[in-house]
Amino acid sequence: MVRIVTDSTADVPDELARELGIVVVPVHVIFGAQSYDDGVSLSREEFYARLITADPLPTTSSPSAGEFEVVYRRLRDEGARAVVSVHVAATLSAVQNAAHMAAQAVPEIEVAIVDSSQVSMGLGWQVVEAARAARAGSNVDEVRDIIARVRQQVRLFAALDSLEYLRRSGRVSWATAAIGQLLRIRPIVEVRDGAVLSVDRARTRARSIERLKELVAEQGALRSLIVLHTHAQDAALALADEFKALHPSLSDPIYVAEATTAIGTYTGPNGLGVACVVDQGPK
């Protein structure tokens, strides 16, 4: 059997990961001198509670090659004949470098490393479809073909509540962030082909949420959808309810998930996002 591995930036809901046997290797979150495993020794709830008052901001780091090697060897010992390891875009993180090094250290089992060109559930939907195919008996090449197809179908949009965390992280210039804060601009971004692109901006939270819904509607028929949030569960649940009414025939239930710490570090709390898979007809 082919097994599927990913990293915790994928935001795959726990129930789906358990159901499909997806192995999630946690990234590391660093507050001061203390390092935590994302979702293991530091929950998302604890992370966002600390983030609000953190000064300086926490940082993140990828799992080590040794951590991936342990996972690949365990799966080999459990009887896996091959592993497909699908990860956050190489342009956004060093996770893939560690996975490649680990794969070379375990030559007795085939390990295919795949660049999702995405993050969060833009990556996660690729992982879920890969795991479903692997459980159905697909081989490594077939699984990789499925991932490539889903990569073309997935869309990831997010509405940030503020530019402040991007400013503090150094990801935007101080002047840009200062003007944005003064005007209360809420940026709306899309992750595409390994890049974070600015697609719009809104002056109010209500308008930013409406723009998210418009962007999703522009994609046409959908197969899967998840609402993501950074410490904004009530707003995310409300948005999910709206999508349930708008998209009653999805193949998957609509999930709600708190976004990875690697995203929250740079976007801050109260953000909302949507990751969907466009339905392009029969598989």
Image (cartoon, helix red, strand yellow):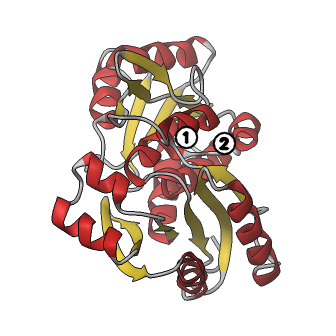
Task: Locate the N terminus and report the quarter of the image it occupies.
Answer: top right
Observer-nearest of 38 and 232: 232
User: Quick one: SS at disc 2?
Assistant: loop
Observer-nearest of 25 and 162: 162
User: Quick one: SS at disc 1?
Assistant: helix
Which amino acid type corresponds to the residue marked 1 in the rendered image?
A: Tyr
Q: Residue at x 37, y 49 (%)?
A: 266
Residue 182 location, quadrant:
bottom left
Q: Which residue is mark 2?
A: 137
Q: Is residue 163 above or below residue 26?
A: below
Q: Is residue 129 above or below residue 1?
A: below
Residue 207 location, quadrant:
bottom right
Q: Which residue is mark 1?
A: 48
Q: Is residue 251 visible?
A: no
* 1 vs 2, front mark: 1
Q: Is residue 154 above or below residue 125?
A: below
Q: Residue at x 33, y 19 (%)?
A: 65
Observer-nearest of 64 and 33: 33
Which amino acid type corresponds to the residue marked 2 in the rendered image?
A: Gly
Q: Separation of disc 1 and disc 2 at Cα?
A: 39 Å
Q: Is residue 178 visible?
A: yes
How far from the left and from the top, in percent, is residue 56? 32, 34
How far from the left and from the top, in percent, is residue 178? 25, 66
Residue 173 is left or right of residue 19, and the answer is: left
How far from the left and from the top, in percent, is residue 142? 52, 51
Task: Locate the C terminus and report the quarter of the image it occupies.
Answer: bottom right
Observer-nearest of 79 and 119: 119
Upstream in the sequence, badge 1 or badge 2?
1
How far from the left and from the top, in percent, is residue 42? 57, 25
Q: Residue furthest front?
A: 182
Residue 74 is left or right of residue 63, and the answer is: right
Residue 264 is left or right of residue 1, and the answer is: left
